[in-house]
Image (cartoon, helix red, strand yellow):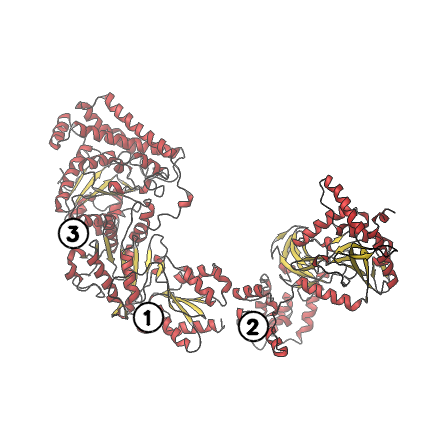
């Protein structure tokens, strides 16, 4: 199986689906000759032409609204929001419009759009270009929030998103773009709303998303040598959240840690923990349930400050050890 | 002055009770006579009513605690009273003295010399009536801040006194029957983890294996089991048992039963059982033999006026002995009805205290299991117990001509406390019993 | 037609001769004219019935009534094709009725019934009928303006002849997306007809206090979009402007912007106590500039209708509304077990 990058995996999914389905088209800022701010749409303009790789003015709200309007007439638009932070400019269209239309109009229409948005820190992009806003998007019933952590998941989930009848916020991570992994060349989808057990273990369940999956897996590998077996769960989709897999895992391990880059307060870890503690898995919980999140600060510019604004491997390791060894 | 709420004594020989559950919690408004908690005595579960109306406060024992009777378990605050009015838990005499403050001041003055505290702290303790021996020093000496902190801590409502344990440990405790209180928590601040319960559960069998080389499942004692164990051991150790056995021809009493049942069926009443008839005859015999219906009382013997017969009944949890009161005053039909009511209550675990206390004699029947004859252990403070075996049809000599007939025969064994009952007395009772059972018409005289 | 920018037209509808000359120029038949009258009567009957139902406690939520603005809805509907797409905002009852919506289903939705257009999920503010290309009313002021860009884009990509009509109020023109959308729709020459129904108040805010430069339509100049600003209470003038605009849009020349000056009789919504405008002002519009009254006068003058026929048509409109109420009231409520439906497709 060829090894390609996370960025290439998403590009491949878009490319293949645009070949397969004429209704699919891209719109966003600088996605044409420039190839997108991160180069994800490079060469697509030449292949598909300016109509289907449609460059827009800097008008995030109208980019999303345009996608919505076109989807009402049977198109399958993919809107790119250059940095996830800019989603705020389009939030009315995402939350008040796209998310609600199917419901508000009595099920008589659907809004099959995909909104791509790279989030996350680590690129020195400072406070307005580095946020992880997936928790915000989880609060709107009708939306789907997809959040792959590997190239394989990214392609399969993108293909699933492109074929989903609902509005999908496809949350990417800047730092993951260059990570590589095995990705089948052909067509495959990963069902939206199904978590993946990235590593089985029996001492503690760690639920993590995007880059935190990678970090947790590194920590799990290390701890395994000390006899601590960590079960790493990547929800892959945050809305709808696959609570069943998580609950079953916690019932098995008796311990839960949730790790995300998003700010701790109001972060989705709280949601996961509430689901687990309120479930039958409660009776199997054998240590405090904990969460590690980004510090409650805007992401700083300075390299050192930026790094320590979000959980690092050492933090995850320390937390897991404390829980498994009964120190907290 | 808050009203002390004591663990009531329900039974003559009751020493303690286990709190099953508080139905009211700290700070709840309670009404006089309203149920506040449920406790379990050695015999039954009992609802305990509030001694007064007011706010329930200062709960001293939690669910599962075993509390000696008459101990204060909580207080009821009247209007205008607050938690601050509660006596200190470890100075139980305080609440009986109206002027608590001077007592404390004296203590403070007396301790001043011995306690290592700053002068400001000493003065503050005196003013606020704080016992400095209870104040923790943050440094070398107790400071003003320490006293302040102590006072603030005292003002806080009492924390829910529960054992720290993880949900998993609690579940495992339930499943294994190992009380969390008996498990040493290895977690932070003594928190019991599931592994601790598991270790406890595994520890006993592993030591047995080490000693005897055999494996055994460990079943922790339930409250009712523990009671049975204590009482039976006490009975066997304290009262010298003698046992006497007689055989009874049940032909007549069975005929009587059948005749009875023809009658009761006409009135749509439940059928009479042999047990009901036997109880009636036992009661009759007890009236004729008062020393069998008696208790040993140290330097005297109590001959009970009432004939209250307990019927040992097996229930899933163990053994209970519901008591039929004043059986000598009752007709067979009534005995029959009451007996079936009590048996049902016992099965449903709904026996009330009055249903199990006050017994003067006990009948234990294992006949339904095919047991022909056995000896029972006396149920203190009673002095005798009758063990009833199974009715067996067998050939017996029925007259002076050595004529043999097959008759329904029953063995009865009386266990008696020799401190009260001599062999002859026991024998007389048994012969009355045989006479009554073989010739029920004797009861008419 | 108004290329005389910067001036609104609040003229009367002219003499009999002027009216007849204009009608002939526009090629409007008697049937067309009677149709316009019937539409306006139906809208007004619907709105007054809605008000009565609300007063009678039959309506659960609020509503935004368009009585006084009927000429805009009627004029547009005759000027565009039935299968053109429609996106509008709060005050949309009239647009739907003029577009030929099933009044029974509208009324049922209004009463929150399961038989309503939105199966009781949307109510007055969100009526949509995707079968007749009515893409729904938007409750976020201006929320539909940028969506029309997408509809226009799809129509262009799909090389279709339909156009998108997007109607919004004077208040919506001050939302940021208004400008984003104007720019993009002009940039890509999309087939979108934007109509700003200026009824003088954005809720309570007088358009003159909210808008730096009037008319609103002149903003289209900044984006190179042709525009007009017309008397929205003159149904023939509305039709005239819309006809030109729709033909322009349909011919592939890009968007067009029409502002219609009109007036709403009821408050903004049911909680409005009209504290920001005088009774005299409302009465002046009702007595002197009412669109139905003005149009009826012409129809009578030109002997297209007589009094009896005019009343008969109005009576028929009333009957339609009464039947709709009957239908709606007899309809079932949505089953509570369906609460979670339609969140995801």
Q: Nearer the viewer, mark 3 or mark 2?
A: 2
Please, which chain is the residue tagged with disc 2 on? Answer: B
Q: Percent x, y for residue C14?
A: 16, 29
Could you tell me which chain the residue with mark 3 belongs to? C
Give neighbour class at mark 1: few <14, some 14-19, many 20+ (Cα, 10 Å).
many
Q: Nearer the viewer, mark 2 or mark 1?
A: 2
Q: How many marks?
A: 3
Picture layout, residue B391 above or below residue C65: below
Discs 2 and 1 share one subunit: no
Chain letter of mark 1 equals: A
Image coordinates for residue A251, horizontal then vertical, percent: 47, 64
Q: Are marks 3 and 2 in contact (CB under 8 Å)?
A: no
Label 1 SS: helix
In this view, the residue in front, B229 or C326, is B229
Residue B326 in view here? no
Q: Residues within 10 Å of mark 2 (few under 14, many from 20)?
A: few
- Disc 2 to disc 1: CB gap under 8 Å: no
Cα–Cα span, label 3 and label 1: 41 Å
Q: Residues within 10 Å of mark 3 (few under 14, many from 20)?
A: some
Q: Which residue is mark 2?
A: B199
Closest to the camera, between mark 3 and mark 1, is 3
From the viewer's perspective, is residue B334 above or below residue C316?
A: below
Q: Could you tell whether C51 is left or right of B45 in the image? A: left
Element carrying mark 2: helix
* The N terminus of chain A, quarter of image: bottom left
Q: Residue at label 1?
A: A306
Q: Which residue is mark 3?
A: C188
Image height check: is B300 above or below B339? below
Q: Secondary structure at mark 3?
A: loop
Real-space Cα separation, disc 3 to disc 2, in angstroms: 74 Å
Look at the image and tell me whether residue B394 can be seen. Answer: yes
């Amino acid at each position: 199986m060829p090894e390609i990058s996370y960025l290439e995996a998403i590009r491949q999914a878009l490319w293949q689906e645009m070949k397969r389905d004429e209704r699919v088209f891209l719109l966003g800022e600088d996605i044409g000759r420039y190839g997108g701010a991160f180069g994800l749409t490079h060469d697509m303009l030449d292949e598909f032409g300016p109509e289907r790789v449609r460059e827009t003015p800097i008008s995030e709200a109208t980019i999303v609204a345009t996608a919505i309007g076109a989807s009402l007439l049977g198109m399958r638009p993919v809107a790119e929001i250059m940095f996830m932070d800019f989603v705020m400019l389009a939030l009315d269209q995402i939350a008040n419009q796209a998310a609600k239309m199917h419901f508000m109009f009595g099920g008589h229409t659907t809004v099959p759009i995909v909104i791509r948005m790279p989030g996350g820190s680590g690129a020195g992009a400072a406070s307005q270009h580095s946020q992880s806003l997936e928790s915000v998007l989880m609060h709107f019933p009708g939306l789907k929030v997809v959040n792959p952590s590997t190239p394989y998941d990214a392609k399969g989930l993108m293909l699933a998103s492109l074929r989903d009848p609902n509005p999908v916020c496809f949350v990417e991570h800047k730092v993951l773009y260059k990570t590589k992994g095995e990705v089948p060349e052909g067509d495959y989808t990963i069902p939206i709303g199904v978590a993946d057990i990235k590593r089985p273990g029996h001492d503690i369940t760690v639920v993590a998303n995007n880059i935190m999956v990678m970090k947790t897996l590194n920590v799990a590998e290390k701890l395994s040598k000390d006899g601590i077996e960590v079960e790493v769960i990547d929800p892959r989709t945050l809305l709808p959240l696959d609570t069943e897999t998580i609950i079953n895992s916690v019932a098995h391990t008796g311990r839960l840690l949730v790790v995300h880059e998003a700010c701790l307060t109001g972060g989705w870890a709280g949601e996961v923990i509430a689901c687990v503690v309120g479930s039958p898995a409660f009776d199997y919980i054998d240590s405090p349930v904990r969460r590690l999140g980004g510090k409650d600060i805007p992401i700083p510019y300075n390299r050192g400050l930026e790094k320590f604004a979000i959980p690092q491997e050492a933090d995850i390791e320390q937390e897991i050890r404390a829980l498994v060894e009964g120190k907290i | 002055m808050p009203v002390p709420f004591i663990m009531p004594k329900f039974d003559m020989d009751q020493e303690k009770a286990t709190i099953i559950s508080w139905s009211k919690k700290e700070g709840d408004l309670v009404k006089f006579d309203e149920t506040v908690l449920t406790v379990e005595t050695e015999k039954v579960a009992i609802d305990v009513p509030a001694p007064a109306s007011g706010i329930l406060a200062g709960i001293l024992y939690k669910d599962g605690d075993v509390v000696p009777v008459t101990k204060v378990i909580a207080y009821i605050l009247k209007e205008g009273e607050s938690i601050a009015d509660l006596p200190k838990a470890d100075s139980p005499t305080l609440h009986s003295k109206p002027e608590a403050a001077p007592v404390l001041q004296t203590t403070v003055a007396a301790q001043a010399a011995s306690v290592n505290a700053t002068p400001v702290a000493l003065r503050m303790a005196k003013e606020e009536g704080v016992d400095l021996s209870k104040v923790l020093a943050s440094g070398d000496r107790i400071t003003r801040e320490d006293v302040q902190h102590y006072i603030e801590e005292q003002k806080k409502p009492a924390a829910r006194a529960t054992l720290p344990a993880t949900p998993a440990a609690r579940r495992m405790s339930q499943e294994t029957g190992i009380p969390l209180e008996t498990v040493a928590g290895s977690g932070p601040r003594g928190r019991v983890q599931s592994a601790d319960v598991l270790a406890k559960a595994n520890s006993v069998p592993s030591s047995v294996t080490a000693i005897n080389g055999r494996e055994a499942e460990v079943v922790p004692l339930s409250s009712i089991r523990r009671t049975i164990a204590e009482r039976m051991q006490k009975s066997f150790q304290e009262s010298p048992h003698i046992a006497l056995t007689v055989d009874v021809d049940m032909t007549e009493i069975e005929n009587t039963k059948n005749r009875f049942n023809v009658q009761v069926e006409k009135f749509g009443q439940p059928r009479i059982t042999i047990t009901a008839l036997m109880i009636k005859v036992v009661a009759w015999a007890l009236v004729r033999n008062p020393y069998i219906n008696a208790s040993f009382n140290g330097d005297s013997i109590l001959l009970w006026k009432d004939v209250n017969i307990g019927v040992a009944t097996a229930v899933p949890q163990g053994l209970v002995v519901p008591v039929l009161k004043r059986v000598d005053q009752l007709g067979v039909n009534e005995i029959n009805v009451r007996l079936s009511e009590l048996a049902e209550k016992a099965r449903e675990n709904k026996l009330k205290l009055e249903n199990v206390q006050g017994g003067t004699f006990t009948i234990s029947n294992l006949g339904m299991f095919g047991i022909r004859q056995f000896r029972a252990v006396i149920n203190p403070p009673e002095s005798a117990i009758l063990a009833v075996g199974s009715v067996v049809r067998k050939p017996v000599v029925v007259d002076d001509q050595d004529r043999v007939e097959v008759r329904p025969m029953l063995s009865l064994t009386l266990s008696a406390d020799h401190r009260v009952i001599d062999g002859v007395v026991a024998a007389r009772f048994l012969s009355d019993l045989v006479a009554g059972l073989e010739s029920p018409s004797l009861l008419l005289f | 037609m108004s290329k005389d920018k910067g001036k609104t037209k609040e003229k009367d509808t002219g003499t009999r001769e002027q009216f007849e000359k204009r009608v002939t120029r526009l090629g409007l038949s008697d049937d067309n004219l009677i149709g316009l009258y019937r539409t306006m009567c139906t809208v007004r009957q619907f709105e007054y019935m809605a008000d009565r139902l609300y007063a009678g406690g039959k309506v659960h939520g609020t509503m935004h009534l368009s009585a006084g603005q009927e000429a805009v809805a009627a004029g547009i509907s005759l000027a565009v094709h039935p299968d053109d797409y429609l996106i509008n905002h709060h005050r949309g009852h009239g647009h739907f009725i003029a577009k030929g919506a099933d009044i029974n289903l509208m009324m049922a939705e209004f009463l929150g019934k399961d038989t309503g257009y939105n199966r009781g999920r949307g109510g007055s503010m969100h009526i949509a009928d995707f079968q007749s290309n009515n893409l729904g009313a938007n409750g976020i002021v201006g929320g539909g303006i940028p969506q029309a860009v997408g509809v226009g884009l799809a129509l262009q990509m799909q090389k279709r002849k339909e156009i998108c009509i997007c109607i919004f109020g004077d208040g919506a023109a001050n939302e940021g997306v208004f400008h984003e959308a104007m720019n993009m729709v002009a940039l890509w020459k999309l087939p979108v007809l934007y109509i700003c129904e200026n009824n003088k108040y954005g809720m309570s805010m007088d358009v003159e206090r909210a808008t730096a430069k009037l008319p609103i339509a002149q903003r289209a100049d900044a984006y190179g979009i042709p525009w007009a600003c017309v008397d929205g209470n003159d149904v023939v003038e509305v039709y005239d402007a819309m006809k030109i605009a729709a033909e322009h849009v349909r011919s592939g020349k890009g968007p067009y912007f029409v502002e219609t000056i009109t007036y709403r009789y009821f408050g903004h919504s049911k909680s409005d106590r009209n504290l920001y405008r005088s009774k005299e002002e409302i009465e002046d519009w009702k007595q002197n500039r009412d669109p139905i009254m003005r149009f009826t006068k012409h129809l009578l003058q030109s002997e297209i209708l007589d009094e009896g026929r005019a009343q008969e048509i109005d009576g028929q409109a009333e009957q339609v509304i009464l039947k709709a109420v009957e239908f709606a009231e007899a309809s079932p409520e949505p089953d509570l077990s369906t609460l979670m439906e339609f969140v995801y497709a």
